[in-house]
Image (spheres, helix red, strand yellow):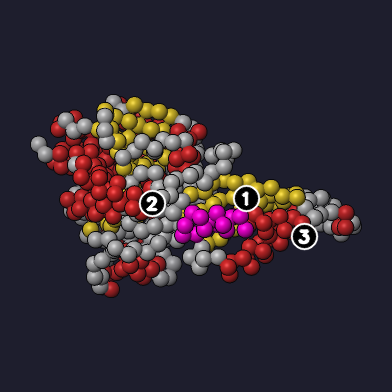
Amino acid sequence: MQAQDIILGYINENEEELSYIAKDIWDHPQVALQEEYAAKLLAEKMQEAGFTITWGAGGMDTAFIAEWGDGAPIIGFLGEYDALPGLSQALASEKSPIDAGGPGHGCGHNLFGTACMASVLALQAAMQRTGAPGVIRFYGCPAEETLVGKTFMARAGVFDDLDAAISWHPGDTNITWNGSSLAMNSFKVNFHGLAAHAGGSPWLGRSALDGVMLMDAGVNYMREHVPPESRIHSVVTSGGQAPNVVPAFAQVWYFARAPRREQVEEIYQWMQDIAKGAALMSGTSHEIEFITGCYDLLPNKALSDLLYAKMAEAGDMTFTERERQFARELQATFPAGSVQHGFDWMKQSTSAELDEAAMDDPLWEAVYPHSPTPPRLGGSTEVADVSWITPTGQITTTCWPLGTPGHSWQTVASSGSSIGAKGMIFAAKAMALAGFDLLTKPEVLAAARADFDAARGDKTYVSPLPPEATPQ
């Protein structure tokens, strides 16, 4: 029997169980670094299949590596399973929290980790039947939403011996994700002042909140002089407890993003100087609490082409009219312009010609060729750090209605439905088929390595994390 038949047959035969696992994780959402339920569930399934499980990668209790096989090459699959806070949602087309204020899978990571697990299990079956050499690894990566998991795992060196890595993400279309993303630093600035009675003797105090506000003003003036694609976001996490008390402590939390890692470093250095100036102006002291940082994604043409070909071989994706109706009901709740935005993004991402009439279909079943000049994502991902260590390829598949807002209750609802499950199964098939080619066709792996070397040039991966940083 051909490897393709073994892989597709394994996933088809186990579709019901895989869908159950994804729904079970959806039913038990846990936020970054607290994903005990999902990590244990996935690890136990792979351990039963004979994989060796190693816990605690990167110093995180919910991170693990599942490995099977011998020799070379070594192919890795990056799985995620963390939920987002405040997005609890029932399987319904109107906003209906299960646990008000509780977490929910607003990025579809219940599907994400399960599909990657399915891929390595299907590959194992094919390797056993065909005698294909090599090692396959599933990386259980926690805390993607806080950009912590893979960055700390990368610093620990767990990806260093990989010959290639494969990943995916739930989305609203079937396409290879071959664009880049923004590099980022996440850090908090703590200001310390002196408390005093704001009405009776304010001159005896020094306001830590003044330090925060002065820093934010300085950052706003800086915005004119950074690359236009840069993004700087902030929230004041602590600004005092009462207006009549001069705040002795205040904190602001920043995300600083830019197209290239070195640009983020320059912006971050400037922001540190602004913090010093704000402390001097306000008569306070300050310290910077570095949380995490990540690279810009390094696309790989050879892997993108391989994954596109394997999506075409994975079989048809077909949604029912009932699923389409549910998708239309969800679309009716989207912010104005969401579907148009999704369509416009897709027009930039594919080399295919798209007709506006395609927006009438809420669930896209076709596989689309990727554009040679895709748009850059405005967000960040720590898959990027892996992409600077080893050739890395990604796909996205239809798990949500076209135009679904990211990190939304609508994403949660669709990720827990049969729509999400179908997209997950499709992704698992494509990734496993690509993985078998990487294991058995040296020329495919060589092409991926050549693209990686050309894109990286003379640069090497240096962790953006300071030695003292710990996962949080």
Task: Indicate which disc, 3 or 1, sits on the residue closer to the N terminus.
Answer: 1
| Residue situated furthest bottom in the rendering | 356
Residue 150 lies left or right of residue 175; in this view the side is right
| Residue situated furthest left in the rendering | 1
What span is colored magenta in the figure? 254-270
The residue closer to the viewer here, 99 or 59, is 59
Within 10 Å of the Cα at label 2, are there few (<14), some (14-19), or many (20+) other Cα atoms?
Answer: some
Eye-nearest disc, 3 or 1: 3
Percent of width and height locating residue 335: 44, 67
The Cα–Cα distance between marks 3 and 1, rounded to whole angstroms, is 19 Å
Q: Residue at x 69, y 47 (%)?
A: 287
Amino acid at pointer 1: Lys
Q: Which residue bears the numbered disc 3? A: 281
| Residue situated furthest front in the rendering | 458
Q: Residue at x 36, y 58 (%)?
A: 179
Q: Which residue bears the numbered disc 1? A: 188
Label 3 residue SS: helix
Residue 366 lies left or right of residue 297; in this view the side is left
Q: Which residue bears the numbered disc 2? A: 456
Cβ atoms under marks 3 and 1 closer than 8 Å: no
Label 1 residue SS: strand
- Whether 282 is drawn above or below 435: the answer is below
Percent of width and height locating residue 1: 9, 36
- Whether 442 is drawn above or below 362: the answer is above
